[in-house]
């Protein structure tokens, strides 16, 4: 709950501050969109976790609540998780171009192109996650033990008729598109940026201080470091779950059942919420825009 509140409040402040500075800078556009995405995740995550409270108050109600959450809310949450991956990937690529090709970054990443790119990312993610809305439905079931009718989760005919294809789509295509490939891009770009900054710093130390001041822009370097911190936090949050997921796929552990998977799911949700909440702290401590607002 604390992380969720921090995520809601922090991302609200992020959007307000970043919007006040306008949308002429492409990084601002991406960060506002990321803050909006993280805000939505922070709102939905506590709703999903309510089932852990309701189960102690009313077990039959918790069954119905969990059923509807799994069918209608979790796919939406997956959209925001996927968008978080893609936003940070876009940041990593944009900063990579800015560091290695500084004279071309303003031509490649124009405000208009960035807006088009973000629109595409939203459509792209929603399109690939959409099948998740069609793999489960519910039926009303009379529980004789509690003498009450509850909604229980069942697979749709669409899912049963396409069981093999659907699981291949979920386990291979979606995981690679929104996890393996994006994390690989973030890692490569982040490592390259760190190495480049180290080389630049070493070169500057070899130069005359006056020459170093003219050839180096402290503001730009600070922006690069701030966005690099965003990328690294994303890696800390998502890399463990990606590695575990790949491991489970290869050792053929059932992905949808078991106490171990439930624990892993809880840890993943906490890491995801940490990721979307900590950006506010990064901006406040490392961004000159927040310091001047």
Image (cartoon, rainbow, N blue to C red):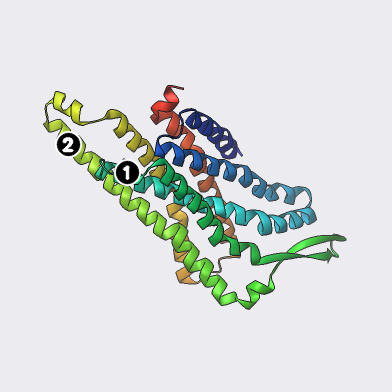
Q: Which numbered tag is attached to residue 280?
A: none
Q: Which residue is mark 2?
A: 202
Residue beneath the point at 53% across and 30% down? 16
The reply to whether residue 124 is visible in this rendering is yes
Q: Earlier in the sequence, mark 2 or mark 1?
A: 1
Q: Quadrant of the N terminus?
A: top right
Residue beneath the point at 26% across and 30% down? 217
Q: Nearer the viewer, residue 97 or 266?
A: 97
Image side of residue 126 versus residue 69, left or right: left
Residue beneath the point at 51% across and 57% down? 124
Residue 100, image x, y percentages? 25, 45
Image side of residue 240 versus residue 254, left or right: left
Residue 261, image x, y percentages? 56, 60
Within-10-Å neighbours for mark 2: few <14, some 14–19, many 20+? few
Within-10-Å neighbours for mark 1: few <14, some 14–19, many 20+? few
**In the image, residue 238 above or below residue 152:** above
Q: Which residue is mark 1?
A: 107
Q: In what element is the residue under mark 1?
A: helix
* Residue 181 quadrant: bottom left
The reply to whether residue 267 is visible in this rendering is no
Residue 252, image x, y percentages? 50, 72
**In the image, residue 58 above or below residue 134:** above
Q: Nearer the viewer, residue 161 or 63?
A: 161
């Amino acid at each position: 709950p604390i992380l969720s509140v921090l995520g809601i409040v922090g991302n609200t402040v992020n959007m307000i501050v970043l919007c006040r500075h306008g949308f002429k800078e492409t990084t601002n556009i991406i960060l506002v969109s990321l803050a909006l995405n993280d805000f939505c995740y922070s709102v939905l995550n506590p709703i999903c976790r309510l089932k852990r409270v309701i189960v102690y108050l009313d077990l039959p109600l918790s069954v119905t609540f969990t059923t509807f959450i799994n069918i209608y809310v979790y796919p939406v949450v997956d959209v925001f998780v996927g968008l978080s991956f893609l936003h940070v990937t876009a940041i990593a690529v944009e900063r990579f171009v800015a560091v290695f090709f500084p004279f071309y970054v303003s031509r490649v990443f124009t405000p208009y192109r960035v807006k088009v790119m973000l629109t595409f990312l939203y459509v792209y993610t929603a399109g690939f996650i959409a099948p998740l809305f069609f793999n489960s439905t519910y039926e009303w079931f009379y529980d004789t033990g509690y003498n009450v009718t509850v909604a229980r989760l069942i697979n749709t005919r669409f899912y049963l008729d396409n069981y093999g294809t659907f699981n291949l789509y979920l386990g291979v295509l979606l995981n690679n598109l929104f996890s393996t490939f994006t994390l690989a891009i973030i890692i490569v770009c982040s490592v390259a940026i760190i190495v480049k900054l180290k080389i630049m710093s070493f070169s500057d130390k070899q130069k005359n201080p006056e020459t170093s001041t003219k050839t180096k822009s402290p503001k730009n370097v600070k922006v690069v470091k701030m966005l690099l911190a965003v990328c690294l936090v994303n890696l800390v949050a998502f890399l463990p779950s990606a590695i575990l997921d790949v491991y489970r796929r290869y050792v053929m552990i059932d992905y949808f059942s078991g106490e171990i998977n439930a624990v892993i799911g809880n840890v993943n949700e906490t890491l995801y919420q940490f990721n979307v909440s900590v950006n506010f702290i990064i901006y406040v401590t490392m961004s000159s825009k927040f310091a001047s607002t």
